[in-house]
Amino acid sequence: MRALRTTTGTPSAWTVTEIAPPAVAGDQVLVEVADAGLNRADLLMREGAYVPSSADWNVAPDRVGFEMAGRVRAVGDRVTGIAPGQYVMAQTGGACAELVAVDHRLLLPVPDSLDLVAAAGLPSALLTEYGALTEAARLRPDDRVLITGGAGGVGHIGVQLARALGVHTVIATTRSRDKAGLLRELGATRVVDTDPENPEDPENPENAENPEDIATVLGPDAFDVCLDHLGGPVLADLLAAAAPRARIVQIGRLAGTHAHLDLETLAARRIQLIGTTFRGRDAGELRALTARLREALPGLLRTHDVRPVIDSVLDLSEAERAGQLLDRPGLIGKVILRIT
């Protein structure tokens, strides 16, 4: 079968190679992959800056891809409730391949309202943001939610999920004024442009507010929950805008891996700073989170129509081009590879 792998060199590259199909254990399902979603973690892995270690990564470390959607081809002898021909999606290691073997407890059904391209871009972001909101932040309907990096491949799902979970105030940040209108369409009630180089344009209602930093425009007591996909100095700025007892869930570090925090503010406002990642999660944790999401999925996808914004769809043979698109500053939403 064809699979995407990282080849060493300067620079490293993604190469389509022929490998043996996976063996299927008794508690696994063999999925014929239609489409796979790419994430920035794929680029970090390629650079050697990210090593997946969760229980859903059960392939060689040179394999590429964290999420996919496709059709069940075969099921193990200990699997019940899943049959060949069903359409499923999952977060799983080595997703950019014609066939993957997945623990059946990590599968999510693809509803009729969702095509496989969109489904391929959902699992990682859904699991990340749903877990961050409901488990880490213990979201309440009256919470005001801030999503940093709101137009990113993960953040734009967080904006939609917050609204779907009953939140009335969702603030999103972006460094591109062109993305402000999209964020409002997705459910953001307020958009903040965090790029100080962008000029003010009060005549255009689609433009975002343009501060020197987040705290300047939001002021104190602006949010109760934050999903932070940026880290670095952005995380440091968040403390001054947080309400007492706010919960900040640190998810991504696109703005940097280090932050200089005002610990006096952190302590005085009793702010909770919570880190989350899938690295190191054991099978029990992943199965439990997937089960909770699976139960909530009909309401999220059918009733509230949570879905990814698709930036680009390319063939598996165009993986190098897909990586370039994934790394460009103007990316909006997901880059998808068509596998079969």
Image (cartoon, grey):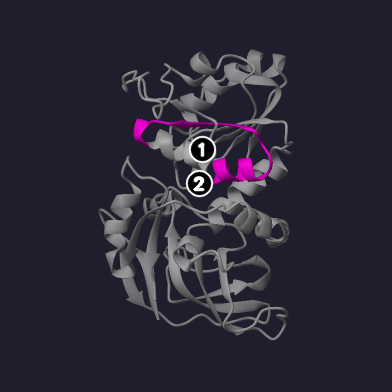
Of the numbered discs 2 and 1, the one sitting upstream in the chain is 2
Position of residue 180 in the picture relative to residue 13 (left or right): right
At which x and y percent is residue 126? 58, 52
Quadrant that contains the C terminus: bottom left
Write down the region rendered in magenta: 157-178
- According to the picture, the residue beneath numbered tag 2 turns out to be 154
Mark 1 Cα-neighbour bin, 10 Å: few <14, some 14–19, many ≥20:
many
Question: In the rendered structure, are the residues bearing label 2 and label 1 in contact, judged by CB atoms less than 8 Å apart?
Answer: yes
Q: Which mark is residue 229?
A: 1
Q: CA distance from mark 2 to mark 1?
A: 8 Å
- Check disc 2 and give the amino acid type: Val
Dividing the picture into quadrants, the one containing residue 208 is top left
At which x and y percent is residue 338? 38, 68
Is any atom of residue 231 visible in this view? Answer: yes
Quadrant that contains the N terminus: bottom left
Count of numbered badges drawn on the protein: 2
Position of residue 324 in the picture relative to residue 111 (left or right): left
Q: Secondary structure at mark 2?
A: loop
Q: Residue at horizontal 59%, vertical 82%?
A: 24
- Check disc 1 and give the amino acid type: His
Choose between 168 and 297: the one closer to the eye.
168
Position of residue 106 in the picture relative to residue 200 (left or right): right
Choose between 58 and 36: the one closer to the eye.
36
Decide whether residue 53 is among the magenta residues.
no
